[in-house]
């Protein structure tokens, strides 16, 4: 899908982006945030620490709010960004709880790179199509999705109802556009 980026599709829509305080994937955060903001989305960045988060490539992102203060009903979409820091949080119960609460509330849930593994561990990808980061040498995240009942798709971006997954930074633009599409379809 190609969006007319002057179109303010998301005016009045609030979107929460969740990142690791140390080691978020720069492109996945900055490109996705830019796509959503250009479409009129109001972005709030959450992490488990207040201050300025640091990306894998040295980018800096001010944290607007702590994860434990996230009220899912206040947002149209909850977006998990990958990176080395998030890869260390795949088993994090609080993040899994956020994923479950997001789907229970009927909100858009999105994850890119390694973050779809958090959704899988939360049980929200069972019997759903999804993608996740992998490489020729590392297929461990695909194994997590499959072991948790997800229908792994070897695609850059996958939308299954209100869940959007993407495989990594090269597809951050398309990921952001897919989130916009999912919000638009939700109504």
Image (spheres, rainbow, N blue to C red):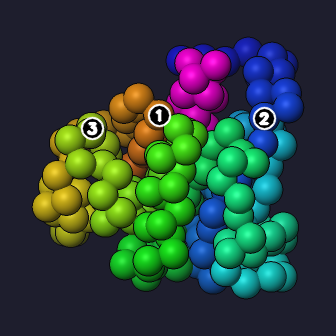
Rounded to the nearest angstrom, the CA distance separating label 1 from label 2 is 15 Å
Q: Quadrant of the C terminus?
A: top right
In this rendering, is residue 60 above or below 155?
Answer: below
Q: Which secondary structure, mark 3?
A: strand
Mark 1 = which residue?
162
Residue at the spot x=75%, y=48% of the render?
74
Q: Position of residue 134 (x, y in %)?
A: 28, 59
Q: Residue 8's mark? A: none
Q: How many callouts does the rendering have?
A: 3
Upstream in the sequence, badge 2 or badge 3? 2
Q: Left or right: where does residue 152 sit relative to residue 103?
A: left
Figure quadrant of residue 127: top left
Mark 2 = which residue?
13
First to last magenta residue range = 174-187
Residue 184 lies in the magenta-colored region: yes
Rounded to the nearest angstrom, the CA distance separating label 3 from label 1 is 11 Å
| Disc 3 residue crowd, few under 14, some 14–19, many 20+, Cα 10 Å | many
Q: Which secondary structure, mark 1?
A: loop
Q: Which secondary structure, mark 2?
A: loop
Mark 3 = which residue?
129
Q: Position of residue 156 (x, y in %)?
A: 37, 39
Q: Left or right: where does residue 107 sit relative to residue 151?
A: right
In this rendering, is residue 71 above or below 77?
Answer: below
Q: Is residue 114 visible?
A: no
Rounded to the nearest angstrom, the CA distance separating label 2 from label 3 is 26 Å
């Amino acid at each position: 899908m190609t969006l007319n980026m002057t179109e303010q599709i998301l005016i009045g829509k609030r979107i929460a982006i969740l990142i690791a305080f140390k080691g978020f994937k720069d492109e996945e955060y900055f490109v996705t945030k830019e796509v959503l903001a250009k479409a009129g989305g109001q972005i709030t960045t959450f992490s488990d620490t207040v201050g300025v988060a640091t990306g894998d490539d040295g980018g800096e992102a001010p944290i607007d709010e702590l994860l434990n203060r996230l009220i899912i009903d206040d947002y149209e979409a909850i977006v998990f960004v990958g990176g080395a820091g998030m890869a260390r949080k795949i088993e994090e119960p609080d993040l899994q709880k956020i994923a479950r609460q997001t789907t229970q509330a009927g909100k858009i849930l999105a994850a890119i790179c390694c973050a779809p593994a958090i959704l899988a561990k939360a049980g929200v990808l069972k019997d759903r199509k999804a993608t996740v980061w992998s490489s020729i040498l590392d297929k461990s995240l695909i194994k997590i999705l499959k072991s948790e009942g997800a229908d792994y798709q070897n695609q850059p971006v996958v939308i299954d109802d209100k869940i959007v997954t993407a495989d990594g930074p090269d597809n951050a633009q398309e990921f952001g556009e897919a989130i916009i599409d999912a919000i638009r379809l939700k109504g």
